[in-house]
Amino acid sequence: MMSEQDSFIEKVLIPHEEIQQKVRELGEQITRDYQGKDLRVVGILRGAFIFMADLIRNIKLPLSVDFMSISSYGGNVESSGVVRILKDLDKPITGVDVLIVEDIVDTGLTLKHLLEVLSTRNPASLRVCALLDKKERRLVPDLKIDYVGFEIPNLFVVGYGLDFAEKYRNYPFIFVLRPEYYQPEFTR
Ligand code: 5GP
Ligand code: MG
Ligand code: MG
């Protein structure tokens, strides 16, 4: 999985096999919880797209999907909490059971804003599934994440959909970059 040319890898935090096992468990749990419901899985682009693709293939229900693209103002690593909708949902969610799929919840500011926006549209229910949770960084108290893959320490991680400067999303495991790769000359 790792090779010598992957010199940018400081450490693999979650190997692919562990992710796949967790995604299967989450899929089974969601399948049980949404029996007989009209489930719409909403992926938050771009970070959640790999996780979402794997997750929905483990949900054994006739669900539908939609996507939203949001961007927080500010730098590459820190969240500012000011969220801009770059692409809204294609379909209305009134009366629909909505499950938001996120890559990672850090401060929680992005998710809080998203939940506020979507709840004004009166979905039948609104829940969140996040692959990663950096709980110790949370700035929003009482933020409920209904389904969590892994709680991780306060490290900036990439891979399995998560990027730094739009790179590394394609690697099938979650890892920490070598410090020199966070330098501005690598953010092109
Ligand atoms: P929050 O608003 O919860 O602080 O930040 C959420 C967003 O910040 C995530 O959806 C993700 O885009 C980005 N983010 C937070 N922590 C990390 C991280 O460790 N790695 C990467 N690649 N993005 C992160
Ligand atoms: Mg995200
Ligand atoms: Mg990003």
Image: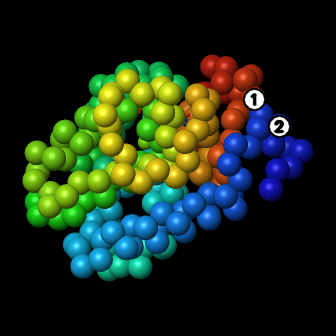
Q: Is mark 1 within 8 Å of ligand 1?
A: no
Which label is found at residue 35?
Answer: none
Residue located at (25% from left, 35% from top): 113
Query: Which residue position is annotated with label 2?
Result: 7
Q: CA–CA distance between discs 2 and 1?
A: 8 Å
Residue 43 placement (x, y as % from top left): 37, 55
- The N terminus - image quarter: bottom right
Say whether residue 119 is visible.
yes
Residue located at (22% from left, 63% from top): 97
Q: Is mark 2 within 8 Å of ligand 1?
A: no
Say whether residue 76 is visible.
no
Disc 2, SS: loop
Q: Quadrant of residue 52?
A: bottom left
Of 184 and 52, nearer the camera is 52
Residue 88 placement (x, y as % from top left): 24, 49
At label 2, the amino acid type is Ser
At label 1, the amino acid type is Arg
Would you say 9 lies left or right of 98 here? right
Residue 147 placement (x, y as % from top left): 42, 54
Please report contact status of discs 2 and 1: CB closer than 8 Å, yes or no.
yes
Query: Which residue position is annotated with label 1?
Result: 178
> How many numbered tags mark residues here?
2
Number of other residues with Cα within 10 Å of mark 1, as a class: few under 14, some 14 to 19, many 20 or more: few
Number of other residues with Cα within 10 Å of mark 2, as a class: few under 14, some 14 to 19, many 20 or more: few
Q: Quadrant of residue 21?
A: bottom right
Figure check: 68 above or below 157: below
Would you say 25 lies left or right of 83 here? right
User: What's the image's color scheme?
Assistant: rainbow
Of 129 and 69, nearer the camera is 129
Residue 148 placement (x, y as % from top left): 46, 50
Figure check: 11 above or below 100: above
